[in-house]
Amino acid sequence: MDEGGERVQDFEGVYRAYFTDVYRYALRLCHDEALADDLTSECFLKAMRAIGRFRGECELRVWLCQILKRLYLDHLRRQGRELPQEEPPDEDQGPDPAESFASQDESMRAHRALHQLDEPYREVFSLRVLGGLSFAAIGELFLKSPNWACVTYYRARKKLRDMMEENT
């Protein structure tokens, strides 16, 4: 079998392993079964062509979902629809709690404040700052969108900032 045939056969395993996850993610994004089918098919076609450029910096499932999200956003742009907005970081409202974990002196105070946070804020913040996960990966863990993970992270960060300022 030639190299191209082997690549397609190998990619069939990727397709079987991740199809359901990618399709569910598409359905969560667009809430339209026909569009989710189309996006999922297009996602796997793009992924098959680009698999040689996959660097392994994230899970393969996350990479596939990133491709799907870009396809969905492209679809929205073509339709002239408004793109989902992520909550902007509130940088001008005091020190970033995420940076407190890097400083030894503030670390204990930041950990105490973190443990006072309610879920899912505590876990999302921990996964992002301490675990280094992307919003796509965090959203996937919670069966939510990457946008949900981003908004939840920034809300957790604001709550932590407020708690740390109260305890100063």
Image (cartoon, rainbow, N blue to C red):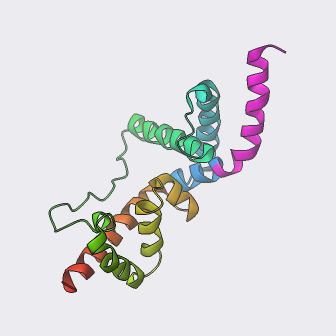
Can you name the residue that lies furthest to the front here? 104
Identify the magenta region.
1-21
What x and y, as percent, mark residue 86?
33, 55
Q: In the image, residue 80 lies at what x, y percent?
A: 36, 39
Tell me which corner region of the image, top left, top right, bottom left or bottom right, holds residue 103. Answer: bottom left
Say which of 103 and 136 sits in front: 103
| Quarter of the figure with the N terminus | top right
Is residue 3 located in the magenta-colored stretch of the structure? yes
The magenta stretch spans residue 168 = no
Q: Residue furthest top?
A: 2
**Quadrant assignment, res 132:** bottom left
Residue under the point 51% across and 59% down: 139
Where is 17 relative to 119, above or below?
above
- Examine the rendered structure and indicate whether residue 55 appears above or below residue 30: above
| x, y percent for residue 88 | 26, 57
Front residue of 5/22: it is: 5
